[in-house]
Image (cartoon, rainbow, N blue to C red):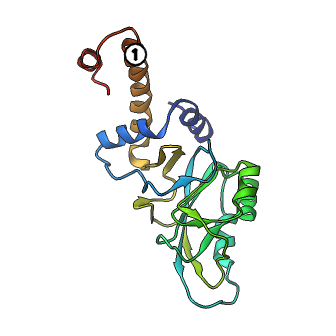
Amino acid sequence: MPKHDPERLDLVASRLYTAVLSDVVDSLGFRNQAMDARVRPVWDGATVVGRAHTLLTVDIFEVRPDPYRMEIEAVDTLKPGDVLIGATGPSTRTCLWGELLSTAARGRGATGAVIDGYVRDVRQIRAMAFPVFATGMKPVDSAGRSVVVEYGTPVSCGEVLVHEGDLIMADVDGVIVVPRQVEEDAIRLALEKVEGENRTRDALLSGMTIGEVYAKYGIL
């Protein structure tokens, strides 16, 4: 198991996927780690792996002075390998994320963004192929509609509790959050499960029944 983060994240990105990580964190006793199914990739094929860097917004109903101050701070404190986790409530009033924040995040070395709310500038985000997951699209600006109140703290995003530094993986099946305290076991077990699934697939293709294969390998 790689100890250095870039190698570990590369291993997860190249060998694993959300469904297998979901299965193993279930087995480790963490059974609410998959975000709400409404959090979807905004472009086909988007995938992301990285460390959670969290921010929290609340809805407001007036335009305040310096409306983007904490949002800018949150993005400017992204580190290489981070995934921006935007917890909005989830809000249907505002739009937290767009092209310029995606560009800034990429410039900081972030690997993607996961928002349990709306995004905009989707055409540009698709063109730059920056992985963004959200519940929908809306063209409005956040000023006067929401404000970032804190970042780098535990948040509920997509109905999952996310801590700063948790392992995030997102693909076409959804978004999974792996808590730091079980991360090493989760990756090890997931790699083992992938190998077992490969054997199971080969056995099924050879003509064995699914009952026979499950009895032999215990994987479904």
Q: Residues within 10 Å of mark 1 (few under 14, many from 20)?
A: some
* Residue at the extreme top of the image, as rendered: 206
Horizontal and vertical percent for residue 163?
Answer: 46, 59
Residue nearest the viewer, comparing 172 with 191: 172
Residue under the image location 23 percent in, 18 percent down: 215
Numbered marks: total = 1
Vertical arrangement, residue 62 with respect to residue 184, above or below: below
Horizontal and vertical percent for residue 34?
Answer: 41, 50
**Quarter of the view holding residue 105:** bottom right
**Quarter of the view holding residue 86:** bottom right
Q: Is residue 146 left or right of residue 38?
A: right
Amino acid type, label 1 = Arg
Residue nearest the viewer, comparing 104 with 171: 171
Vertical arrangement, residue 142 with respect to residue 171, above or below: below
Horizontal and vertical percent for residue 137?
Answer: 61, 64
| Secondary structure found at label 1 | helix
**Quarter of the view holding residue 8:** top right
Vertical arrangement, residue 118 with respect to residue 49, above or below: below
Horizontal and vertical percent for residue 168?
Answer: 51, 49
Residue under the image location 66 percent in, 81 percent down: 143
Name the quarter where the C terminus is drawn: top left
Residue under the image location 44 percent in, 49 percent down: 180
Mark 1 sits on what residue? Answer: 199
